[in-house]
Amino acid sequence: MSNAREFRGFPSRTNFTPVSNSFFSALLPQIDDLAELKVTLHIFWALYRKKDYPKFITYSELRGDEALMAGIQNSSTDEEQLRPALEKAVKRGTLLSLKVEKDDEPGELYFLNSEKDQRAIIQIENGEIVLDGIIRIEPASTEEKPNIFTLYEQHIGLLTPMIAEDLREAENIYPASWIEDAFREAVSLNKRSWRYISRILERWASEGKNDGRTGENSKEDISPTEYIRKYGHLTRR
């Protein structure tokens, strides 16, 4: 028999927590673990209440929240429910995690997977943002980077056979880092089309990409001149 008290309804005056529409359209249909869903919604609520930048929540904060822990516990211990739920949310791409060390103790910071927080994590790792009390930063958890098809579906829309062929061709021509940066630039300018992104890549291949990496020996950092020599016939439209 459940000990849950009956909910008496929402008051006429109450605060609200905004949740992106993409959560309901893209993520919610995929989440089949109740603990993951509860933890995810709790983090939306907790981060919205924070005032500092960047906004993140620590594992210890989540572990110390009695209401959250009571809501996800079952026959297993509380911690056995929390950590797997967080790992699933990170793997799904809902959250980003950053391992840190504070007072000689390891810990984790959790961010929403947004463009703003992606940039914040890079700034933290580069030392451009200093977090109070954090003395050492370990690299963010490394999930497999999305390929060009995933980037297209995430930022533009459904694939068509014709677009898929163009993407496959571009993936064979340009470094993965260039493709990711081109998508990022297009999204930041609200130019969400493959035509615009392909023009960015073509421009970088012909004029150079000022990221400090062109001309190095690695395959991914082949110089624009070499790209034109090898693949120029493919980049012409």
Image (tube, rainbow, N blue to C red):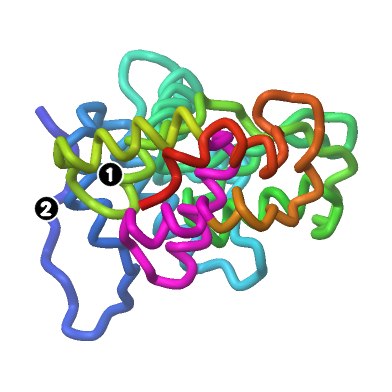
Residue situated in front as seen by the camera: 10 or 191: 191
At x 51% / y 52%, what residue is drawn?
202
**Res 174 label:** none
Q: Earlier in the sequence, mark 2 or mark 1?
A: 2
Q: Which residue is mark 2?
A: 6
Residue situated in front as seen by the camera: 126 or 176: 176
**Residue 50 magenta:** no
Q: Position of residue 45 (x, y in %)?
A: 40, 59
| Main SS category, magenta section | helix
**Res 153 label:** 1
At x 52% / y 61%, what residue is drawn?
185
Q: Position of residue 58 (x, y in %)?
A: 62, 44
Q: Position of residue 95 (x, y in %)?
A: 47, 42
Quadrant position of the N terminus in the picture: top left
Can residue 172 be seen in this snapshot? yes
Q: Which residues are magenta?
A: 174-202
Placement of 140 over or under 190, stated as above or below: above
At x 60% / y 48%, what residue is drawn?
205
Say what amino acid the circle numbered 2 marks.
Answer: Glu
